[in-house]
Image (cartoon, helix red, strand yellow):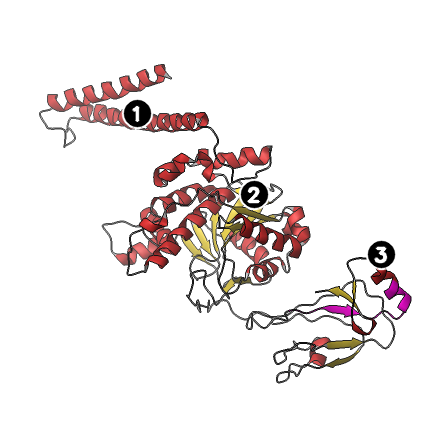
Amino acid sequence: MRLTHLKLGCILACAFLSLTWFTAHNGNDGDEPPNHPVMIQLYERLLAAEFKGELLSRELSSVLTSLRNLTIPNNSSSTNIPEGPIKRNLSLLSSRLPNAYLYLPHLRDHPDSLIPNVVLGQGRTGVSLVLGIPTVKRQKQSYLVSTLKSLLYDLSPSERNDTVIIIFVAETDTEYVNSVAELLEKNFPKDVHSGLLEVVSPSQYFYPNFSRLRETFGDSKERVKWRTKQNLDYSFLMLYAQEKGTYYVQLEDDIVANPGYSQTMKIYVRKLATDDWMFLEFSQLGFIGKMFRASDLPMIAEFFLMFYKDKPIDWLLDHILWVKACNPEKDAKDCNLQKGLLKLRYKPSLFQHVGLHSSLPGKLQKLKDKDFGKVPLFTAHTNPPAELSSSLKHYQQHTLERAYIGQDFFWSLTPTAKDFILLSFPQPRTVTRYLFRSGNIENNRDHFYNTTVEVLPSDSSVRDRLVGGQSPQYKGSYGGFIVIGT
């Protein structure tokens, strides 16, 4: 290490002395380059040496920072990361972005603050598509389960094996984080166990003190805090996702996906005439449906962290484009033209925002993507012949009979306690599975709640055997029915 410092000092000292002699010999003050051809060549070589010296200095600083971090004892008890390859890979997050400690100096007190708490996950990597979904505790209504059902709805087995969906619970409340994990494991057990779904959360030390933020752009203190934390959430999620796959798509927890979105995105990327793009837009709203190369995520996340207190996330993304593409000596029209070459738009949009209640308390989010187009409001199913009856009154032409034969969806007036839908089969049927789905994209809040699915066995001995203790998951109900689902 001392020898390297000595070598660096010699390079810098020699470069400085040479430049000093060179400018003095040519009779100028060093602000203007020389005019003699030989001197010009020497001048350029010295500048190159000086540049290499600066690079070496920065590399040494990075190495020293990493060595210091290795000597700091682990004081964090907020993570429960499994031992082995997963933990080693996660530990790379802090080493891949040492500058995070410059932008978030409070992390120096807890060096493990950049290591995520993996609540659910199998460590899946090497996929084509990584979907990142940050979620927070909402005061009014959570859309997370509906969003995941939409994303998983028509994925083929091969697409499920080639995808990772990361749910980043951006909260430090351990009880709430665990409740989200339990909810998803209950609703999507196969997808959790296969490694398709992951749930992660930040360290309790990750977030800075938000009470010292400066109010800008006429935003209230609460809104400034909300957008600042959002910038940190996106950055953390991107850093975690960078090693997972080839492409990363940023989503939100209150969206609906167009059927076939996964295959559509992959085909679009393959057919692009140029690879010069920085991100692709599959929705025109905010930060929804933005696809990045996973290899670009460290650079993008570092830019966000540099200015996380200053502007909203979509403004910062636009500033990256400006830095990369725009010539300050040209007008705004040329700038927009150049930025348009780095962000390519796919139409129609593949994702629609459906949440009414924003994660910012008190804010109603009514924005809709006009390019999303129409999606089917129901999926027809082939059902066995049955006599139908219900205590519910249907709305307009949306009857139960038309829904059962696959012509429409059933839409009733608001149900009350003890309302029912009864399917009576003329001959006993062997039932191996059932599907009960409520709600659609245009009427997202029109769901059945507190509902049970029950069957009446044709043989009473079957009921006695199931309810009598051999199958504790089944419960008896009125009139000999058995509850098989809620």
Which numbered disc covers residue 118?
A: 2
Q: Given the image, on which type of amino acid does mark 2 rest?
A: Val
Dot label at residue 86? none
Give the label, 2 or 1, closer to the camera. Answer: 2
81 vs 427: above or below:
above
User: In which quadrant is the N terminus drawn?
Assistant: top left
Q: Nearer the viewer, mark 3 or mark 1?
A: 3
Residue tagged 1 = 53
Give the mark, 2 or 3, whose residue is nearer the N terminus: 2
Q: Position of residue 453 (x, y in %)?
A: 73, 68
6 to 204, vertically: above or below: above
Circle 3 residue: 470
- The CA distance from mark 2 to mark 1 is 41 Å
Residue at x 87%, y 64% (from the top left corner) = 464
Please indicate whether residue 357 sits to the left or right of residue 51 in the image: right
Q: Secondary structure at mark 1?
A: helix
Q: Position of residue 97 (x, y in %)?
A: 42, 37
Amino acid carrying mark 3 in the image: Gln
Give the CA separation, mark 3 to mark 1: 76 Å
Q: Is residue 268 above or below residue 41?
A: below
State which region is magenta.
Answer: 450-464
**Residue 14, percent across and down?**
23, 18
Q: Quadrant of residue 358?
A: bottom left
Mark 1 and mark 2 in contact (Cβ < 8 Å)? no
